[in-house]
């Protein structure tokens, strides 16, 4: 178990790496996103799986927070589902700036707050009906119980935490392009942190002299138990073969029925 000081040190270093890559992601994505959000009121980046679960949670008229919202593209689409107050939290100022630019283009009233998730204070305590965590977030958390306690704190009593994430079993396999073989890399239970030395440009694959970014493996049972130990119960859990990361194209193309993503809904008790 890591101390909170250690967790903050590791995550602060990671946020420097995220801030550093944000202008590179912007070069790949922002122009198209700005155009789409400005011109098409129906535009959405949410896929069928995400939409189905959000519809079950009846987003309309609800107050929503997204933890690690990146450039805000997903939260803006949730706002378009007639959500009430929407607040996105991310620790990289450069991504928050992109999110504000997109919300202005879309003419949507969504708040974006730059903060390390572990530093969110009681200002936002019990303010949200639904908190979302999606695609490539949990692996950046050095530990999950304190992380889920933050999510639980944001929720109103009886609120729901919605998670749509890449499946932790994928961590066992060395990621690769479509024709790369499936190579078993680490044990499912390996807790060694992984330091990415070549940067976080998972859109363009650009390698650069990057600030180190450290990711962590958490098993499915670590994640579910962290939810249960943070004052929440499991309401829904489903695994899917669909690929939602920008990483394991080799597993997707092998088409071997490997679980690549999951949705998990935890309800605050
Ligand atoms: C892979 S991205 C999320 C992508 C997003 N779901 C999407 O599909 O657009 C991870 C995000 O988490 C943020 N992040 C990572 N660790 C964080 C922390 N400790 N506090 C706040 N934000 C963090 C990064 O800045 C980054 O924007």
Image (cartoon, helix red, strand yellow):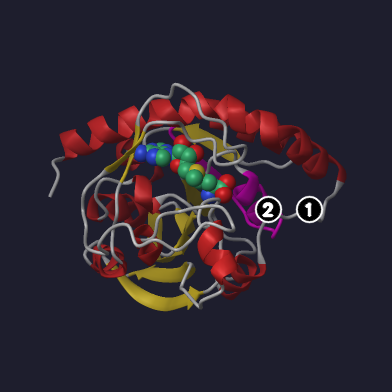
Q: Viewer-proximal residue, 52 or 267?
A: 52
Q: Which residue is mark 2?
A: 77
* Residue 58, image quadrant: bottom right
Mark 2 or 1 closer to N-term?
A: 1
Kind of element beneath mark 2: helix
The answer to whether residue 155 is left or right of residue 246 is: left
> In the rendered view, would you say 82 is above or below 258?
above
Q: Which residue is mark 1?
A: 43
Q: How many marks?
A: 2
Q: Spatial distance from mark 2 to mark 1, Cα to Cα?
A: 8 Å
The one of 253 and 121 positioned closer to us in this rendering: 253
- The residue carrying mark 1 has its beta carbon less than 8 Å from ligand 1: no
Indicate the position of residue 90 as horizontal and vertical percent values. Answer: 47, 37
Q: Judging from the image, what secondary structure is the residue with disc 1 in?
A: loop
Residue lying at 55% horizontally and 69% vertically, measured from the top left? 254
| Stretch of the chain drawn in magenta | 73-93
Residue at far right of view: 39
Vertically, is 244 above or below 112? below
At x 21% / y 48%, what residue is drawn? 192
């Amino acid at each position: 178990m890591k101390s909170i000081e250690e967790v903050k040190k590791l995550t602060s270093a990671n946020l420097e790496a995220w801030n550093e890559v944000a202008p590179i992601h912007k070069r790949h994505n922002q122009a198209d996103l700005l155009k789409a959000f400005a011109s098409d009121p129906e535009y959405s980046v949410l896929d069928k799986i995400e939409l189905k679960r959000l519809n079950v949670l009846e987003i309309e008229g609800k107050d929503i927070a997204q933890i690690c919202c990146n450039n805000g593209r997903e939260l803006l689409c949730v706002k378009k589902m007639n959500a009430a107050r929407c607040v996105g939290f991310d620790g990289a100022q450069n991504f928050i700036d992109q999110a504000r630019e997109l919300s202005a283009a879309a003419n949507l009233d969504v708040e974006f707050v730059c903060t390390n998730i572990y530093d969110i204070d009681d200002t936002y305590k019990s303010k949200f009906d639904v908190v979302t965590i999606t695609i490539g977030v949990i692996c950046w958390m050095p530990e999950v119980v304190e992380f889920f306690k933050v999510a639980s704190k944001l929720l109103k009593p009886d609120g729901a935490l919605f998670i749509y994430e890449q499946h932790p079993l994928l961590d066992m396999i060395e990621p690769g392009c479509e024709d790369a073989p499936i190579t078993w890399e680490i044990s499912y239970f390996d807790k060694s942190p992984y330091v990415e030395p070549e940067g976080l440009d998972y859109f363009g694959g650009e390698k650069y002299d990057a600030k180190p970014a450290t990711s962590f493996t958490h098993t499915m049972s670590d994640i579910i138990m962290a939810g249960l130990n943070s004052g929440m119960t499991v309401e829904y859990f489903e695994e899917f073969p669909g690929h939602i990361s920008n990483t394991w194209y080799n597993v997707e193309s092998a088409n071997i029925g490997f679980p690549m993503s999951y949705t998990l809904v935890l309800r605050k008790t």
